[in-house]
Amino acid sequence: MSSHDPIQLWKRYCRHLCHRPDIGLRLDVSRMHFDDAYLDQMRSRMESALQAMQSLEAGAKANIDEDRMVGHYWLRAPDLAPDDEIRAEIEKNVRAIKNFAQQIHSGSIAPQQGDGFYVVLVVGIGGSALGPQFVADALGTTNDPMIIRFVDNTDPDGIDRTLAELDENLAQTLTIVISKSGGTVETRNGMLEVAAAYHKAKLDFARHAVAVTMEGSRLHKQAIDERWLHIFPMWDWVGGRTSELSAVGLLPAALQGIDIDEMLEGARLCDIATREPRIGNNPAAMMALMWYDAVKNRSKRNMIVLPYRDRLLLLSRYLQQLIMESLGKRYDRGGKEVCEGLTVLGNKGTTDQHALVQQLQEGTNDFFATLIGVSRDREGKSMPLGEEATAGDFLHGFLLGTRAALFEGGRESMTISADELNARTVGVLIALFERAVGLYAELININAYHQPGVEMGKKAAGGTIRLQKEVLGYLGQHRGEAQTVEQIAAAIGHADAAETVFHILEHAAANVDHGVSREAGESPFAAKYRM
């Protein structure tokens, strides 16, 4: 599509606008470069994708690696669950979350010291943190009954920084540890560091701790043994990146004071809208088709997400995991090497008018953009700031200006417009992208619900820790003997891992934890290490 005639563009906009007032959302794909015949050509394939999604919702075991169902759609519509037991568990869990939050807010569940909990500290990583962080930032207010903080990495300095922010409020801090298996290393490390901080403050960690985990997991057993305040379930049919509307996200949100019923309702309504068989009236189907056309015809694998609202700043981080972990696959379902995936980048407008938008407009044309706007600027009236325009008018103008400039430069973009930003809208956005990911995966014939690359990364990290143990053990047995990297690697039978041994020793020598010292040599590789 190349016409720049304003009348023709207006007609194209009217023809292809997906307007869904039932979920307060519009999707404009008119500035994507598909031709009008494309939608008809793809109709049968999208119908097949929609049927596959219907099978998924009915309980098909889509996670073939683990022989599991994929049921995040049931979280907001328990009546869709394939059996009464799952339906009852979902409903019971939502009631338990709301009841627990009410007890915390009322003070009927109180900390070891003081009259109540006022801070929530979430310890988790990946899907156990990105969704809750996005929702907390998007919907938090100064009137929230509890403030929320996160430990989402095994970075000692980051953990120290978060704990320093809590400081004297630690006694009034409720810590939620989220780990499906209970064995996620980063989360366990964070939990142990946080527990040590409570102990240092002469506080019983268990009297301030809540677990969100699978029944029978390592974390589940620990929480029972130590008599933590509560345990909320995770289920094997909910993947981490689609877990925001489970206890993973609902519990922190409810404690923060967010209306979780509205979030669930927004997602439920969006699921209904995105089951729509009329392709042009289905925003998730249209998004998936736009992704497919951009990637297959022009190899534009970079998706730039630009939300024009500060509260949506973390949306791109949340979408990075949802989209990239789901779609980044080496092999298709038939075992053919395809190396699929979309790279999600972005921050927010108009901040990026002064940063990456310059390259988007004039640099390498290897992307398509997703602009996100919200019609209602704020509660109440805004003051005029110049030319009879408010700050919100300028923000909207920058969105439209970016959209126009990208199109003039031959760049593709689509625009999502929400009526307002509230808990229901956040639920809609979560469900919209979840469904678009599922439909796109069907179009490119990959499994969106497993993550072999993630597991490989975890195994590689575990191998490094085991090698470190051997290195430190060897140095401990030869205390006082200064040796080079190659000497140490050969001595422990890992001459082929000399590079990893080098990195291990450099890190060990930079910290006081293991008692390793470094003697400089003529080059970094001639240095010697000892205990």
Image (cartoon, helix red, strand yellow):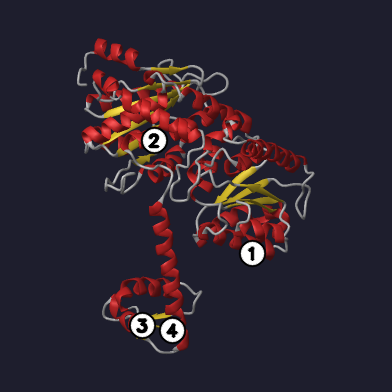
Q: Identify which amino acid the numbered label 4 is placed on.
A: Tyr
Q: Quadrant of residue 522?
A: bottom left
Mark before the other along the chain sequence, 4 or 3:
4
The answer to whether residue 344 is left or right of residue 33 is right
Instruction: Quadrant for the N terminus, please.
Output: top left
Neighbour tally class for label 1: few under 14, some 14-19, many 20 plus, Cα within 10 Å: some
Rendered residue at 38%/30% (across/down): 49
The residue sitting at the left extreme is: 2
Read off the residue under disc 3: 488
Mark before the other along the chain sequence, 2 or 3:
2
Return the x and y of residue 87 as percentages of the image width and height: 63, 35
Read off the residue under disc 1: 196
> Nearer the viewer's eye, disc 2 or disc 3?
3
Q: Is residue 310 visible?
A: no
Q: Is residue 249 above or below residue 374?
A: below
Q: Identify which amino acid the numbered label 3 is placed on.
A: Ile
Read off the residue under disc 2: 351
Read off the residue under disc 4: 474
Task: Check contact, mark 4 vs mark 1: CB within 8 A.
Answer: no
Task: Check contact, mark 4 vs mark 3: CB within 8 A.
Answer: yes
Total labels drawn:
4
Mark before the other along the chain sequence, 4 or 1:
1
